[in-house]
Image (cartoon, rainbow, N blue to C red):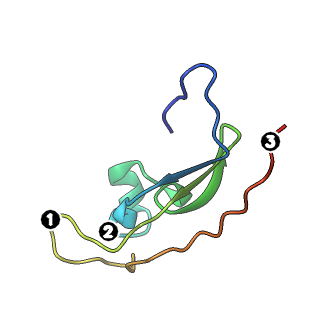
Amino acid sequence: MHDFRPGMHADLLVGGHTHGGQIQIPIVTCMMTGVCGDIAYGLREEKGVQVFTTSGTGMVGLPMRFRVPPRVDVLNVAWRRCG
């Protein structure tokens, strides 16, 4: 995750589309790319901020996806008052 500028804050970061790695071969994909576990997809907390990353629907290079189905995600965001 990128560092915020001093004084900046966010409750939610939405990042996209990692393609989820596009091709997922257990252990091999992690070793080759260094991207393992929930970094490529999903909701997690990092540095006190909720971060959601989608694997999207597209492809780059090879016109295929393996063990990474295309996804369209819907987020329901509830606003809260600050202060």
Mark 2 crowdedness (10 Å alpha carbons): few <14, some 14-19, many ≥20: many
Label 2 residue SS: loop
Cα–Cα span, label 2 and label 1:
10 Å
| Residue depth check, mark 3 versus mark 1: number of the one nearer the observer | 3
Cα–Cα span, label 2 and label 3:
39 Å
| Residue depth check, mark 2 versus mark 3: number of the one nearer the observer | 3
Of 74 and 47, nearer the camera is 74
Instruction: Give the quarter of the image for residue 57.
Output: bottom left
Q: Which disc, if any, is residue 82? A: 3
Q: Which disc, if any, is residue 61? A: 1
- Circles 2 and 1, Cβ within 8 Å, touching? The answer is yes
Of 80 and 17, nearer the camera is 80
Amino acid at the residue labelled 1 = Gly
Residue found 40% across the figure and 65% down from its top: 20
Label 3 residue SS: loop
Residue found 80% across the figure and 41% down from its top: 82
**Which residue bears the numbered disc 2?**
22
Relative side of 30 to 13, left or right = left
Label 1 residue SS: loop
**Most extreme residue toward the right, as rendered?**
83
Q: Position of residue 79 (x, y in %)?
A: 73, 57
Residue found 42% across the figure and 56% down from its top: 30
